[in-house]
Image: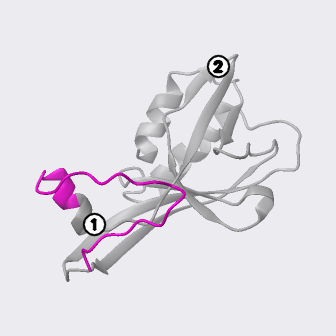
Amino acid sequence: MTLKKLKDELSSLPPESPVIFYTDTDKIDGNYHVTELKLARIDSIDCVGRRSDREEAFLQLLDGHGGDYMTNAKFSGILEQSINSVKRLGDAPVFAEFGAKNSILSIYHIAEPELQNDQILIHLVSTRSKCRPLEDAICQNSIPKPVIRLDEPFKNNCC
């Protein structure tokens, strides 16, 4: 998901509908606040010594204290203004930063918005640590895809 794609998907939904973000365990309360939209350049090296240079965007949300949810028109306007102000912000993969009840900040994938009962629901999907060389090998079908259980640590021999 990119911010441009999110904005485009929201443009087909009713502007007066409330935008409600939720995780697997929590719903972000009404009166939440978009604290920051940022673009980060990442220059990294992985466990097998490969360098990577990429950009990632982040949408940071501050939990609300109840009340009304932001409308699609207002949220889309924030996205539009931010995309127009920060070069390449709309083109990079975007992640959400959020801490339930404004506690420990976690990073989430942003799912496609869904319209249900005149509300726009956006699921924030938990992220996991990952080994890029292992993911690449799986994608190239050079090794079988491992079964990852959420209740056990992920073990591999790539490093």
Farthest residue, direction top: 117
Crowding near the residue tagged with mark 2, few <14, some 14–19, many ≥20 C-alpha atoms within 10 Å: few
Pointer 2 residue: 116
The percent position of residue 73, horizontal first and vertical second, equals 64, 32
The percent position of residue 87, horizontal first and vertical second, equals 39, 59
Q: Which mark is residue 4?
A: none
Residue 113 higher or lower than 61, as above or below: above
Q: Tell me which residue sits at (80%, 58%) in the image.
A: 101
Residue type at mark 1 is Arg
Q: Tell me which residue sits at (20%, 60%) in the image.
A: 136
The percent position of residue 93, horizontal first and vertical second, equals 39, 53
Q: CA distance from mark 2 to mark 1?
A: 36 Å
Q: Tell me which residue sits at (54%, 57%) in the image.
A: 151
Q: On the rendered structure, is 32 left or right of 122?
A: right
Kindly indicate the quadrant of the structure image that contains residue 39. Answer: bottom left
Examine the rendering and report whether any part of residue 14 can be seen: no
The residue nearer to you, when weighing 145 against 11, is 145
Pointer 1 residue: 132
Q: Tell me which residue sits at (49%, 34%) in the image.
A: 112
Q: Is residue 143 magenta?
A: yes
Give the secondary structure at mark 2.
Answer: strand
Q: How many marks?
A: 2
Q: On the rendered structure, is 81 left or right of 53?
A: right
Residue 14 higher or lower than 57, as above or below: above
Crowding near the residue tagged with mark 1, few <14, some 14–19, many ≥20 C-alpha atoms within 10 Å: some
Q: Quadrant of the N terminus?
A: top left
Q: Are marks 2 and 1 in contact (CB under 8 Å)?
A: no
